Image (tube, rainbow, N blue to C red):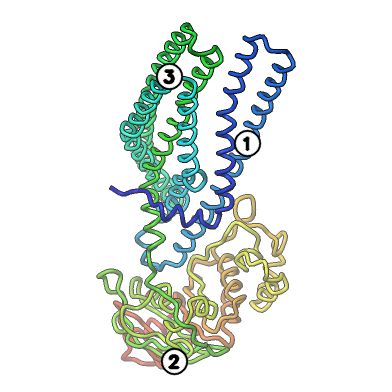
Amino acid sequence: MPTFDRALLAAYLRPEWRRAVLLALLLLSAIALQLANPQIVKAFIDHAQSGAPLSLLLTIAAGFLAVAVLTQVASVVETFVAEDLGWRTTNALRADLTRRALELEGAFHAEHGVGELMERIDGDVTAVADFFSSFVVQILGSGILLAGMLVLLYLADWRVGAVLTAFSLLGLLFVTRGGGFVAVKARASRQAAAELTGYLEERLAGLPDLKANGADEYTLYRLDQRLAARFRTAWAAARAGSLFNGGVGAIFAVAMGAALALSAVLHESGLVTLGTVYVVFRYTGMLQQPIEALSIQMNVMQQATGATVRIRELLETKSEVVGGAGAILPDGGLTVKVENVSFAYASAPVLDNVSFHLDAGHVLGLLGRTGSGKTTIARLLFRLQDPTAGVIRVGGVDIRDLRLEQLRSRVGFVTQDVHLFHGTIRENISLFDGNVPASRVHEAFEHLGLQDWLAGLPQGLETRLGPGGRGLSAGEAQLLGLARVFLKDPGLVVLDEASSRLDPVTLLLVERGISRLLENRTGVIIAHRLETVERADRILILEDGRVAEMGDRESLVRDAKSKYSILLRTGLGEALA
């Protein structure tokens, strides 16, 4: 059975050790004040019963009020420090998990959906948040508070101390041994919640397809099943928790009765004062507090164990794509040389011994039917994945010898579906890099010939996209994708073109933008239209992951023996896609 990852807790608490120490001091101060308050009341009762002067009683009362106020202040400050510590450590963990997810290659993301990663990065971290804020301190504090009360009860009368020690041990035994079934129910409830979250995320992302294909009723049916499972597991967890808390309450109700009965007998015999009876009553009522706190922390630890296992798995997942030592790329357009490259997803081959060469400043049109390996070549050039065999050289350098950030700063990639974020046009172009001036973004639009389109937007670069803002068509998103790549000033541009879906006006803007983007740069274009093929200097046709034909566009068009020449001549190149 997995155990809680204490090393993970220590690793993220260590940088915040000052706050953790402050939290411990505040907790110890609060414990001391809690223990002192009943003693002050005891002194007041005993002095009042013995006829002490009013001035002394008022002094004791003032001390009681001061301690009560200090207890509340310590509690408020302790809560603030604990929350601050918890958010700092868990946010650091979320950042590390997100960074690791960004580092991992496409094969990992193909196996792990967005909903699953969201649950790991946020849901699992939230499940262990208490450990990063106050787990150790609460465990230590509850133990000290329990020990302090029992010592003071022994000092009041050893017989009372012995009776309540026995009940405390019984309570501890119950909460440590009897709470396992609560943790089991709670874990089942959490798993059902995670499945519901993942289902909703996936279905909402695919909402247009669901509605277009009439899958509303089936979606609701499957949602109803998950909601029912969530209800059943949550209800079972709540029932188990109620039974458990009822058991703890029953033990201490009996303890309270026994302590009061014994105190009454001792007081009647003249062995303890009335103030001591109050202390026994007060501390007996307080005994349940640290034991329940220990129980809660132990149950939370059991619930969080699975979360820490999943967190550790993601943190320790190693990317198969690792940056090199940092070779130097030449300025300007970059040559591309693919040498005997093969690639497979698991055991399914995608590319088989593909080789081609592209001179700097030239454009390669990449054609092939769906599934022939076109997009895979684009992803390999960008090192989103590595080939299973062969070598890819860019600018004469094996791309495995380049740092990843160095390669990706010199290779631009415009996908078929450009993803836009909730923010302004400028933020989407610069990808929220505040160091990129507005003049540089304007320059990108002007060079691509898109300044008139930009001027037609309500607030220009500050036009907000997404919820509450403006929506863009697929073609307009392509325009932003081109500007985003131009801003990088890459030496190699990879375009997974989607211009076949565009209206004529937007298509004209996109085609003009592509032409200007490719000026003095090397280009690899996954072609879907004849216009794109005409732009290419060379054409590579893939079939079943192999190079079917490659050559200059003019020679392939003229070659009567070419299997694809008639398609190229008649403008049906998009039939290959």
Q: Position of residue 535 (x, y in %)?
A: 51, 84
Q: Earlier in the sequence, mark 3 or mark 1?
A: 1
Residue drawn at the location 72% of the way across and 60% of the way down: 459
Residue drawn at the location 58% of the way across and 52% of the way down: 18
Question: In the depicted view, which residue is nearer to us: 212 or 350?
Answer: 350
Left or right of 481? Residue 238 is left
Left or right of 353? Residue 376 is right
The numbered disc on residue 74 is: 1
Q: Position of residue 492 (x, y in %)?
A: 52, 83
The numbered disc on residue 98 is: none
Question: In the depicted view, which residue is nearer to us: 374 or 245?
Answer: 245
Closest to the camera, between mark 3 and mark 1, is 3
Q: Position of residue 12 (x, y in %)?
A: 49, 55
Q: Which residue is mark 3?
A: 160
Could one spot residue 83 in this view of the protein? no
Judged from the image, the secondary structure of the residue bearing numbered disc 2 is helix
- Binning the other alpha carbons within 10 Å of mark 3 as few (below 14), some (14 to 19) or many (20 upward) gives many
Quadrant of the drawing holding the C terminus: bottom left
Instruction: Identify residue type, mark 1.
Output: Ala
Question: In the depicted view, which residue is nearer to us: 319 or 282?
Answer: 282
Q: Earlier in the sequence, mark 2 or mark 1?
A: 1
**Callout count:** 3
- Binning the other alpha carbons within 10 Å of mark 1 as few (below 14), some (14 to 19) or many (20 upward) gives many
Q: CA distance from mark 2 to mark 1?
A: 82 Å
Q: Which residue is mark 2?
A: 554
